[in-house]
Image (cartoon, rainbow, N blue to C red):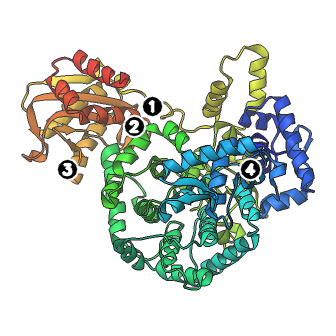
Amino acid sequence: MFDEKAYRLFEEITLHDKISKFEVMRVLNLTERQLQYDLDKVNDTLLMMNLPVIRIENQSFFIDKILKKRIEIGMPLNINAKQFVIPEDTRSLLIYLYTYIRSEALSNYHYQLLLGVSKNTALTDVKKAKLSCEEWDISLVYSRKEGYHLKGTENKKWKYASYCIDYLLSQPLGKELIILIIKAWRKEEELVIVQQIVDRLVKKNQLKLVKSRKAEMILHILFVKLRNKTEKLQYTEFEKQLLQRQLLFENGKQLATSLFNGKNETVVYFFTIQLLITQEEIKDNENPFLEELAEQIIEEFEKSTLLPMHYKKQLKISLYNHLVPAFFRITFAVPLVNPMVTRIKTEYADLFEFVKRALEPLSALTGKMISETEISFFTLHFGGYLEKSKEKKPEKVNALVICSNGVSTSIMLRSQLQDMFPNIQFSRVHTIEQIYHIPITDYDLIFSTVEVISIKPVYRVKPLLTDIEKNHLIQSVSTQFPRLNLKNISINQLMKIIHKYTEVIDEKKLLSELITLIHSREIEKGAYKPMLSELLTKDMIQFTNQEMDWKSAITKAAQPLVDSNKVQSGYVEAMIKNVEEIGTYIHIGKGIAIPHARPEAGVNSLGISFLRTTTPVLLLDKEEHKIDIFICLAAIDNQAHLKALAQITKLLSNDTTLNAIKESKTAEEIISIIKKGEDE
């Protein structure tokens, strides 16, 4: 029988053309015994479904062509409740969805059959489902006449159903679990009908939809159709007018006519929302206020990170494409699931906070808080653009990148690939449908998150790669493209040698650092992000009673950076020139200015210096821009300074802390305030 661990193993093996036992054990953190145990479960289930088993040959996994073909075309495994163990944390979600589309009175016995569990286990799961429903302001209740049923507004019932569907699709076996519910009500044909109608609509109107979001949308539509109760989804007049102004409203009407024959008026608005939040490319300028908002968000991001964005035109276009669906999700409170949220918040913690601040205009426009899940997708978006390299390398290999997870995830994926393969020229992100119109002479290889059939080498990847996955990918690419001259050192062999002669205390950390050292081209620049107290040391802090003009103040503030050879003298001139050309943008408020310039203007190493002036300095000789604190920033790239800058922002946004800094008379007092802030 499949369980969650066995299915994860199945996914990992089938994701790659070829992967070794050792690599799978490292990725999934398995011992050889655990690996064999889970593989036996996988193969037992495959045999029950009359599918070929997965074999191990020469320490690598071998997948039969029949099984591989089924995976390539995206067919779900034909699993029933007796063939796998449904994870405990998803059973309450299945109970809810099953009840949401019920066509008869439900008893506890129905849930037992659905989940393949005992009576007592089913009762426990129902209790959990009730608690989950309460969190969404819904009630799962029982009566003799109606059996188990739902109480609450139709909009809230749908909102939780939407979350359940999207969450399950993000989990191993999720698609199969949803189909299990559809089969339980004998509605498989309805799924096929909805799929066909949506596909015809997309083709006829040449809609560009995110592939993974489209899969969610089809199930959203199906479940609303299967529910088809007397209660209807409700929308305010303002919401209706907003949706009626959208070009996709006509497509929503077409879906409503095809699926409901005009018997449900409000479903038109529901379908329009589904199409709006599933878009990948927005061609028509029907929401100019969102174009302006995209510009405003970029400006806020630049202002808070002190990073003038290159490729701003491309960034605005891609951000607008992401912003439109996000705006409608937030406006209509559509839940969003992103399994990578925790990882993004951990790996891009400082960037996450800056993006959160930059999205305040979106929050003001919608009148709603922006969820961490939404922020995480925007973080991927900006993170990808920060990593774009302007360097031109000789003898490029050309690659296509295909990602079905949306524009933000696509940008971050391409960014990771650019860092790993500096000598590969990556195209803009393409969908599978688009690549078949591209001459094969235009590219040498394909990186894709979905299965692609091509005569050129195809490498299956995940949207956010782990260190181990990066190492495996680099070795695979270097084998087929030796002219890239990659550092093709086998981490597996290296680890074996280390284990042979030493005792490893923390294998995961060692593995991660070895991969970063060998393969990352950013290691010399900014892999480590120092704390503010590590940069703003005693010799970088100055106080002055002199009266001076703004140019002299910037020059004096930057002198410690010049004296310590962190910057060249030309960098000071570049900071002054920026103010002359761009204006008072370095003034961030409260009498604080942060002069800075591009790294290529003369930065040797990361540095920050501080100057407190007793007499305020007029920036550009303007009375409204009085400055008494100058913090000069010398950044070596787009990432290394973000941790220190985040700490500066946190300190200076607190009026009590800022007053303490302004009242300080010595460098030691400033350092003490900084360290206290870091400890909090």
Q: Residue furthest front?
A: 144
Secondary structure of residue under mark 4: loop
Q: Earlier in the sequence, mark 4 or mark 2?
A: 4
Residue positioned 52% across, 75% down in the render: 267
Residue positioned 69% across, 66% down in the render: 104
Q: Counting other residues with Cα less than 10 Å from the Cα at mark 2, is it few (<14), some (14-19), or many (20 or more)? A: many
**Which circle, 3 or 1, is nearer the viewer?**
1
> Which mark is drawn over residue 642?
2
Distance from Cα at disc 1 to Cα at disc 4: 33 Å
Pick the quarter of the image with the N terminus.
Answer: top right
Q: Counting other residues with Cα less than 10 Å from the Cα at mark 1, is it few (<14), some (14-19), or many (20 or more)? A: some
- Is residue 611 found left or right of 79 in the rendered image? left
Secondary structure of residue under mark 2: helix
| Residues marked 3 and 1 touching at CB (< 8 Å) | no
**Which circle, 3 or 2, is nearer the viewer?**
2
Q: In the rendering, at what x and y percent does residue 449 appear?
A: 67, 55
Distance from Cα at disc 3 to Cα at disc 2: 25 Å
Secondary structure of residue under mark 3: helix
> Which mark is drawn over residue 646?
none
Query: In the rendered image, is residue 304 in sight?
Result: yes
Q: Residue tagged by mark 3?
A: 580
Type of amino acid at the residue the image marks with label 4: Phe
